[in-house]
Image (cartoon, helix red, strand yellow):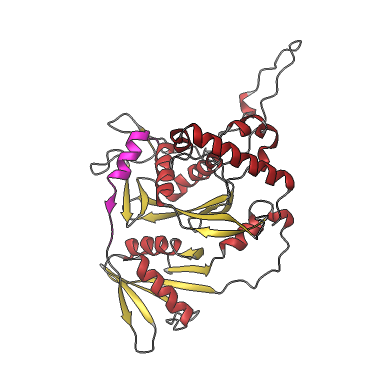
Amino acid sequence: MKRSALSLHATRMAALALGLATLAGCDTLNDWFASDRVNYKVAGSAPPLAVPSDLQATPTDQRYIAPPATLALGGATPRNMTAAGNASEGKPTTQDPLGMHIERDGDHRWLVVDGRSPEQLWPLLQDFWKENGFALKSDAPATGIMTTDWAENRANIPDDWFRRTVGKVIDFAYSSGTRDSFRTLVSRMPGDTTDISITHSAMEEMMTGQDKTSSRWVERPRDPALEALFLAKLMQKFGLTDAQSKQLLTDARPATQPAKVVDASDGGATLDLPESFDRAWLRVGLALDRTNFTVDNRDRTKGIYYVRYADSMEELKKEGLFGKLFYSGPSKKPAHEFLVNVRSKGDALTQVAVVDANGQVDTSSDAQRLVSLLHAQLN
């Protein structure tokens, strides 16, 4: 991708300003690059129409006022008052006085909301991502999968003197060179609770060529701290304070049981998880999110995750930035779909396997590589 002369000039000027700012003091820069500072680009709304001074505003008939976007069919579920005085989406219990808590598996955390179903929380999750500057790429309440499109964290761009002046006119020329996307998995759990996990994906633009006028996008590792930040923001959306949400993240409850590889005589390996189907189902979904395999669909009643290998760079070219307008690369053959089967073998034992369309263990090298990746993520 060739950069325009305007973009290159703005980049060089921004670099000069950055150098001057560095000489002025590193503390200021550290403030701008703080890990908890996010500002994803939000599409602004038009201001309300003003009534001319020589006219009188006609009272609006209440019958024609649209209900709030978050109002569910039949009315929104009322919030619960906690002993701490919060109007919480969750239902307070002895174990969860705020109506929710955080559980963790390694560096991956998820939110458990008491007394609420996925259907009740789904509209709030839609609003949550839109309020934080994201467009939704997939929005499937039937499968509990919600994915944002790629977006840029504008807070990663230093707010130097050049950008504050000339940048007001050519701010589009400024770019952090990174894009983020988030996947939300919403799972119905026993005891009238809902589990919500957030998984981060990231890409970075790297300059290439001898003259550094071309670039390509490469994957960056997921950022668990950024995932935790959005979980904290989501808890605040659900009625907690900033301090309460951070405390629940600190007090995250471990929920880890190691997976064991079981080798079959035909060469197909499976995994045994020493826990109930409900817990194993959630953990396998989280583990898949931590690999390069994307969950396109899932059927809890059959215990099947439908996954494919994800090429993040291709998705970014086609879906993000200017890709929808300008990307005309060759259309690749759809990636092969894998079926990950989660099957109960008892009250406290669950089998995980990659199977074929007939439900038999898939012994192909790609399927067994997926099993190995899941084993690494589950331990």
Front residue (pair 374, 73): 374
Q: Residue at x 39, y 83 (%)?
A: 268
Left or right of 157 in this view: 115 = left
74 is higher (above) or lower (below) than 151: above
Quarter of the image where the N terminus is located: bottom right
Query: Residue 288: x, y in percent?
Result: 44, 64
Left or right of 353 in this view: 211 = right
Considering every residue shown, the one lying at the far right of the view is 54
321 is higher (above) or lower (below) than 291: above
Q: Quadrant of residue 303?
A: bottom left
Query: Residue 213: x, y in percent?
Result: 68, 55
Front residue (pair 366, 126): 366
Let me know if residue 128 appears in the view. Answer: yes
Q: Residue at x 23, y 41 (%)?
A: 94
Quarter of the image where the C terminus is located: bottom left
Let me know if residue 42 appears in the view. Answer: no
Q: Quadrant of residue 328?
A: bottom right
Query: Residue 120: x, y in percent?
Result: 45, 45
Considering every residue shown, the one lying at the far top of the view is 54
Front residue (pair 253, 60): 253
Q: Which residues are magenta?
A: 239-256
Considering every residue shown, the one lying at the far front of the view is 23
Considering every residue shown, the one lying at the far bottom of the view is 265
Left or right of 107 in this view: 41 = right
Query: Residue 219: x, y in percent?
Result: 53, 60
Q: Is residue 241 magenta?
A: yes
Q: Is residue 136 magenta?
A: no
